[in-house]
Amino acid sequence: MFMSVSHITFWLFSIGIGYLAGSIPFGLLLARATGQGDIRKIGSGNIGATNVLRTGRKDIAALTLFLDAGKAGLTGWLVQHYLGAPFGYAAAAAALIGHCYPVWLGFKGGKGVATFFGGLFALVWPIGIIAAITWLAIAIVTKYSSLGALIACVVATVAAIFFLPQAAGVMVGVMSAVIIWRHKENIERLMRGEESKIGQKG
């Protein structure tokens, strides 16, 4: 059965608005506005809250974290409210892709963890809780934040596939796949035993 023109329009709008919202580089903009310079030239070179924190401005890092989470959370919620759940899921997933691959920055963005959790807690909060507990537990035990995020993505995807409607499972799966791909360098360092631990200097 073919989709109607209006249905296709809704899908395109949801994906488009999600991507554009996600591609706003809040970390970069806030750092520049507060005189911290170009955060792409320090630390990991990413535009997310973790790299903003390397400037020493915890307040700006916290605001970046909140805004990055809202990219998928608020955008997905608004689209879902007006157009329906499947479109909200599409918008949230597109927001994460936009954050990781923003068109304005040559498709070089953040790693998407905050945006991922924002989307989960706004649209599928039970999965968000499961993912957060998993991340926290792994991070505390191993001291590797990246490993916690990676395992949280896998656990969240499995839980979503088994317990949520198909569209929600697809959203979580797509978001998780993007995050895992964005963490490929972390995975390589973990395998070599060279990944930085939480609180480790240098």
Image (cartoon, rainbow, N blue to C red):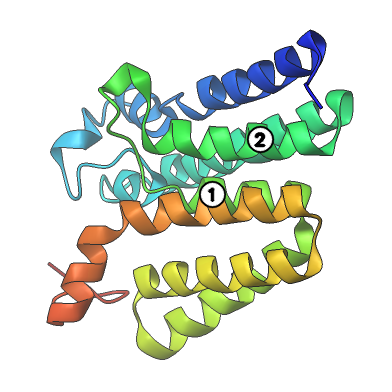
Q: Residue at x 87, y 30 (%)?
A: 81
The residues tagged by marks 2 and 1 sit, at their Cα atoms, a distance apart of: 10 Å
In-front residue for pair 2/35: 2
Q: Position of residue 97 (x, y in %)?
A: 46, 36
Q: Give 61 or 3, whichever is nearer the viewer.
A: 3
Q: Residue 198 sits in which quadrant? A: bottom left
Q: Position of residue 115 (x, y in %)?
A: 54, 45
Provide residue 113's location: percent of width, then percent of height.
47, 54
In the drawing, what numbered circle is on residue 90? 2
Q: What kind of element bears circle 1?
A: helix
Q: Is residue 42 left or right of residue 82?
A: left
Relative horizontal placement of residue 116, taking residue 146 as reference (left or right): right
Kindly give the residue lying farthest to the top in the view shown: 5
Residue under label 1 = 174
Q: Amino acid at mark 2?
A: Ala
Q: Is residue 3 above or below residue 22?
A: above
Q: Quadrant of the N terminus?
A: top right
- Tag 2, which secondary structure? helix
Q: With 161 as the anchor, is 83 left or right in this view?
A: right
Q: Residue at x 16, y 43 (%)?
A: 42
The three-letter amino acid code for the residue at tag 1 is: Val
Q: Is residue 22 visible?
A: yes
For the C terminus, the quadrant is bottom left
Residue at image point 53% right, 50% down:
175
Q: Residues within 10 Å of mark 2 (few under 14, many from 20)?
A: many
